[in-house]
Amino acid sequence: MSDIPPLKALHAFEAAIRLNSFSLAARELNVTPGAIGQQIRKLEDWLGVTLFTRHIRKVEPTADGLAYAARIAPALAQITDASRALRHRHVHMVRVVMPPSFAAKWFSRRMSRFLIAHPGTELQVGSSSEIADFARDPVDIAVRYFSGDDSHLECRLLHRGQAALFCSPHYRDDIGIQTPADLTRATLLNDTLHAWWPEWLAKFAHMDKATIGALRKIDVDLTSVAIESAIHGQGVVLAVPMLAEEDVLEGKLVPLFPESVLTLSSGYFLVHPKNVELRGHVKMFRDWLMNEARDIAI
C-alpha cells in the first residue's frame, strides 16, 4: 500500500469536517452526498480508523477525525497556496474586493487611471459588504473598513475614518442651517451601517438622548444611497469625507460645520494575507492605490 493517502478522499474529508455536513460538502464540491460518503469510507479504510460517527440525519467527527483534520489542515493549506501561486504567477489580472460605497463613490472614478498607467493588466473589481476570505475566495487584495487589527493580514491605511456632515446647497438654504442646533429642523439621513449620529450630535450640538431621539430621520443601509439622497435634497448625511469629495467639488454637496468632524477608530485599509508574496501586478495595484489615497483632501 502506498504511504500517500487517496487525495480525492482527503479533499472530501476536509470539506465535510469543515462544514460538519456531508450534504454541504457535496454542494461545495458539486457532487452527491453519497459520493462524499464513499470517499470518506475509502479514507477510513485506508487509515483503519473511523473519522465520522453516522446518525440518521447528521454526522459527527470522531476524536480521531478531529485530530487528523488538525494535523493535515496546514499541509492542505500549503498545497493550496503553492498551487495558487504557481498557477497565477504569470497572470496579469488583479482581483480586488471593496465595500460597495467605497467602490461607487471613490474608486469608480479612479480605476481607469490604473489601466491607463498599466495597460497590460486586467482589473477585476468586486464590491461586497462581506469580509473576503483569502483562503477561499478568488481575490488577491481587498479594501476593508475596520480597525486595521488582524494578525493574519498585512494592513495598510488608506484613510483614517472620519465622519462629517453634508447636504445639498439648496437644502441648507431652504432649512436655514447655520448652527448645529438648526439640525432640529432637518431630516437626518442615517446610515445604519455606521451609526455615528448620536455621537456627533452629543459632541457638537450638545443634544441629550431625548432630543436626539425626537429628531426626524430616514434609515438607509447603504452609504452611497444616503449620499445620493442628500444630493437630491432629502436631508443631511453624516459620512466619511472621502466618499463625498467628488460631489463637493462638483457643487452637488456642501460641507456643514467643517470644523466639527468626528475622528473614528476604524478606517479604510488595503489588506492581503501576511507571509504571502504578492504577484507583480498586484504589487503595482497596491502601490498605485496607496498613491491615489495620498491625494485625499481630508
Image (tube, rainbow, N blue to C red):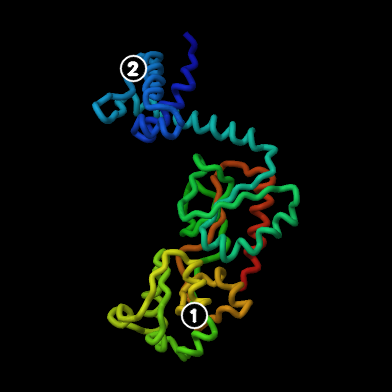
Q: Residue furthest top?
A: 1
Amino acid residing under circle 1: Gly
Q: Position of residue 266 (x, y in %)?
A: 47, 63
Amino acid residing under circle 2: Val
For the residues labelled 1 and 2, the Cα–Cα distance comes to: 68 Å
The residue carrying mark 2 is: 49
| Closer to the eye: label 1 or 2 | 1
10 Å neighbourhood of mark 1: few (<14), some, or many (≥20)?
A: some
Does residue 240 appear to the left or right of 283 in the view shown?
left
Q: Position of residue 31 (x, y in %)?
A: 44, 28
Q: Residue furthest left?
A: 56
Is the residue 115 above or below the residue 137 in the image? below
Res 297 → quadrant: bottom right
Dot 1: element: loop
Q: Say which residue appears at 55% left-offset and 81% top-offset.
A: 254
Q: Which mark is residue 261?
A: none
Counting residues from the start of the chain, the first of labels 1 and 2 encountered is: 2
Tell which of 166 and 77 is nearer to you: 166
The residue carrying mark 1 is: 233
